[in-house]
Image (tube, rainbow, N blue to C red):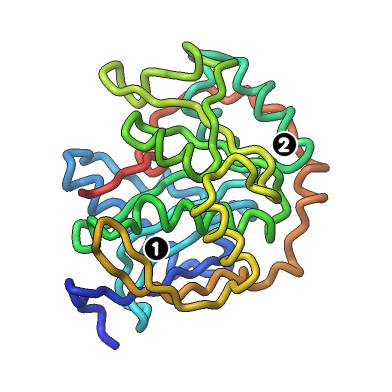
């Protein structure tokens, strides 16, 4: 299988791993994400913003060709208590320090954030950079052990996030919203609580996520707006015997990190 896509019915793999376990695929993730950022005019992308590669509490979902030579999209799940603050803390902390208390409260029971969601133009329109990676992120969260997930969503992704189970958190910012990454762009703070039971997700998404949890290595033909894509899910995270959420929570410190615009954490979907 080559990296060439059949546009009538693409075939891809969606795979999960801990960032520190697969630096080569992390590099492919970074290059693909940088290419998408460059295509929308973000030119100043530096390697110093890719410290998540070395964060033992960062997990990655990658969408790739079956031969693993080409990457079409991905998302990261950062767990609070790693070597970095959560991206949402870095992004909004100087606008509203209440985000630190909010994250800390949830982190005591295990929390994380879905960030850096992107897809290439090649795979645009098939749902990879929106619904299918979002579902997979919720699915693997129970393997990691966390009970909630944060996300900082652009206006056009809020309804999609709500369908998977996220809800707007109005206690921070202006009823949950911030101007980020600049004054003419709005971002909404969202949290998915109750990851284990998914009671806030709609029925279709709940069933799909639960199936991914019970059958983590499965081939599914997914359909979005009459477009079909065959996804080979491999969402069992390797080497979890070396991961301890309990130890991560034990070293947790409340963040006071000042805000910084890190384009590598932005959710960039090509349509």
Query: x and y percent of residue 271 in the render?
Result: 20, 49
Give left or right: position of 240 versus 77.
right
Q: Mark 2, residues whose alpha carbon is within 10 Å: few (<14), some, or many (≥20)?
A: many
Q: How many C-alpha atoms fall within 10 Å of the one at disc 1: few (<14), some, or many (≥20)?
A: few
Judging from the image, what secondary structure is the residue with disc 1 in? helix
Tell me what residue is drawn at x 59 percent, y 15 percent.
171
Q: CA distance from mark 2 to mark 1?
A: 28 Å
Image coordinates of residue 28 in percent, x first then y, are: 36, 65
> In the rendered structure, are the residues bearing label 2 and label 1 in contact, judged by CB atoms less than 8 Å apart?
no
Residue drawn at x 26%, y 18% is 184
Query: Residue 136 appears at what percent x and percent y?
Result: 51, 59
Q: Which residue is mark 1?
A: 27
Q: Which quadrant would the N terminus be assigned to in this image?
A: bottom left
Of residues 80 and 10, the one drawn nearer to the viewer in this rendering: 10
Q: Residue at x 62, y 16 (%)?
A: 98
> Does residue 207 appear left or right of residue 182 in this picture?
right
In the figure, 187 relative to 61: above or below? above
Q: Secondary structure at mark 2?
A: helix
Q: Position of residue 173 (x, y in %)?
A: 50, 14
Q: Residue 25 versus residue 17: which sits nearer the camera?
A: 17
Looking at the image, which is closer to me, 164 or 106?
164
Residue at the limit of the structure toward the bottom, as seen here: 1
- Which label was assigned to residue 4? none
Q: Is residue 58 left or right of residue 177?
A: right
Q: Quadrant of residue 185?
A: top left
Q: Is residue 220 above or below residue 159?
A: below
Q: Earlier in the sequence, mark 2 or mark 1?
A: 1
Residue 84 visible (yes or no): no
- Look at discs 2 and 1 and give the one toward the viewer: 2
Quarter holding residue 104: top right
Q: Give the residue at mark 2.
A: 107
């Amino acid at each position: 299988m080559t990296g060439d896509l059949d546009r009538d019915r693409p075939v891809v793999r969606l795979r999960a791993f801990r960032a520190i376990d697969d630096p080569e695929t992390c590099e492919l993730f970074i290059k693909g994400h940088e290419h998408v950022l460059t295509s929308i005019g973000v030119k100043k992308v530096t390697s110093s913003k890719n410290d998540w590669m070395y964060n033992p509490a960062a997990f990655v979902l990658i969408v790739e060709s079956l031969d693993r030579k080409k990457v079409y999209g991905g998302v990261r799940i950062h767990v609070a208590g790693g070597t970095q603050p959560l991206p949402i803390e870095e992004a909004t902390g100087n606008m509203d320090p209440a985000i630190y208390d909010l994250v800390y409260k949830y982190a005591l029971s295990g929390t994380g954030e879905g960030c850096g969601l992107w897809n290439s133009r090649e795979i645009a329109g098939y749902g990879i950079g929106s619904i299918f990676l979002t579902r997979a992120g919720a699915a693997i969260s129970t393997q990691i052990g966390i009970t909630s997930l944060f996300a900082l969503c652009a206006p056009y992704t809020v309804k999609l996030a709500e369908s998977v189970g996220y809800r707007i958190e109005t206690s921070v910012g202006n009823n949950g919203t911030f101007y980020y990454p600049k004054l003419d762009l709005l971002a909404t703070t969202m949290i998915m609580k109750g990851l284990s039971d998914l009671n806030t997700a709609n029925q279709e998404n709940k069933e799909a996520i639960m199936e991914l949890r019970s059958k983590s290595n499965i081939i599914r033909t997914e359909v979005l707006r009459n477009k079909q894509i065959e996804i080979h899910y491999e969402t069992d995270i390797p080497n979890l015997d070396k991961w301890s959420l309990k130890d991560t929570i034990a070293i947790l410190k409340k963040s006071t990190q000042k805000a910084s615009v890190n384009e590598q954490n932005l959710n960039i979907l090509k349509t």
